[in-house]
Amino acid sequence: MAWLFLAVLAALGGTVLCKYNGSPGLVQGAVCLAGLWGGVYLLSLSLFCGLILSSLTCFLVYTYLSGQELLPAEQKAVLVTGGDSGIGHGLCKYLDKLGFTVFAGVLDEKGPGAEELRRTCSPRLLVLQLDITNPVQIKDALGKVAEKVQNTGLWAVINNAGILGFPCDGELIPMSEYRRCMAVNFFGAVEVTKAFLPLLRRSKGRLVNMSSMAGGVPMDYLAAYGSSKAALTMFSSVLRKELSKWGVKVAVIQPGGFRTSIAGTSDTWDKLEKDLLDHLPTEVQEDYGGEYIHAQQCYLHRVNTLSCPDFSPVLQDIEHAISARRPSAFYAPGGGSYLWLCLASFLPAIVFDFISMKLFGSGRKRLPRALSLPTWRDKAT
């Protein structure tokens, strides 16, 4: 019986990994299959129960695999926001090469990113001026897209535009930065979604929202960014249920660390740091100290250094989300992203905090000024 279960596990796992190598959800699927058959072996079920469970599992795997077939890209139009640079820019090129009609929403239609899209992509790609925090520009973009797609509707909206802000302790982040992150990462995506949903409902298409691993995993220094992405994830999950009756499928992308321009430049960091210091209460600034606040820029440098420069896994997951007959509800491209999301979801908070501090907290040698004073502990007690 043990050999039977191992043979079935090997056959199913091999089929999935060989036939759909690189497709999203395969690691999760392989883990689930291994857990299932490992549990069957440990429980030492009877031959009859084993055969019943084997048949059921084969049926479920067949159903899953049949849903991974990709639909053709021809005559399918997609809207991508944040196409000026980074993942959005690469995504516009990637989808254009696949044969989609791409509407590339950009923050500056005369900027270098927009000009490069016009120069390197096919005539199918149309650049749109689209600041997702500007209702007038959203309305104008909707009119141009509706005129282009006519009665066929829009196949997919990919809300990719987003900002990171200045990562630092949540107490230090100005309220203006919290509002800015919410305005772009959440409210902008919501407004674009609401504007274009009639076109998506007409085509029974796809809504893909670019969240982040930080939207499901509590990460130091990302209180503003992570909160806005968590809101976007929940918004997407609710819409996934509500839009199912219209035939519209909703997917959330929660990538790990990929090197894009979202972290900004040194000039941007200096400006954000100055704005932070200008609005920080005197008491808080004295407790943390200027050196500690300035050292937060090291986090941004570390993000750029450790992040993966190849974000093709993100592009492939988005392709799957808009092309597969039965796309996944959640995608977690990037090394360790899926694992960290699982740990944050299922482990007790005290255990997760301990693990994350052991793995990432050891490199934090600098403390806020007040905590480094020998008298601070005496005052606290």
Image (spheres, grey):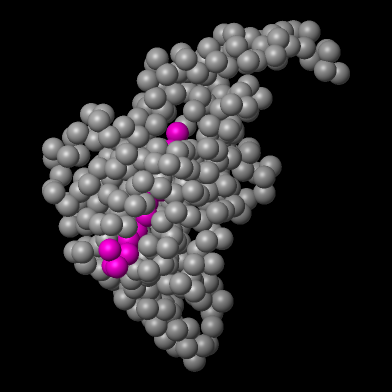
* Left or right of 234, for residue 5: left
Magenta stretch: residue 123 in it? no
Q: Residue furthest bottom?
A: 48
Number of callouts: 0
Q: Which residues are magenta?
A: 150-163
Q: Position of residue 50 (x, y in %)?
A: 48, 85
Which residue lies at the image location 50% right of the left edge and 18% below the top edge?
272
Between 75 and 20, which is closer to the camera in this rendering?
A: 75
Asked where in the image residue 56 lies, by quadrant, the reply is bottom left
Depth check: give the residue in front, 324 or 361: 324
- In the image, residue 256 sits, relative to residue 101, either above or below, namely above
Quadrant (top left/top right/bottom left/bottom right) for the C terminus? top right
Q: Is residue 152 magenta?
A: yes
Residue drawn at (43%, 41%), measured in percent from left and top? Answer: 136
Q: 137 above or below 38?
A: above
The residue at the point 36 percent across, 51 percent down is: 142
User: Visible in this render: residue 276?
Assistant: yes
The quarter of the rendered structure image containing the N terminus is bottom left
Image location (x, y in percent) of residue 98: 18, 56
Horizontal arrangement in the rendering, residue 326 relative to residue 296 (left or right):
left
Q: Is residue 100 above or below residue 225?
A: below
Which quadrant holds residue 265?
top left
Residue 91 is left or right of residue 194, and the answer is left
Q: Residue 122: horizontal and vertical position, in percent?
A: 13, 48
Query: Which residue appears farthest toward the right when viewing the image?
Result: 381
Residue for point 49% across, 74% down: 245
Work out whether residue 169 can be spotted.
Answer: no
- Residue 376 position, x and y percent, is 77, 12
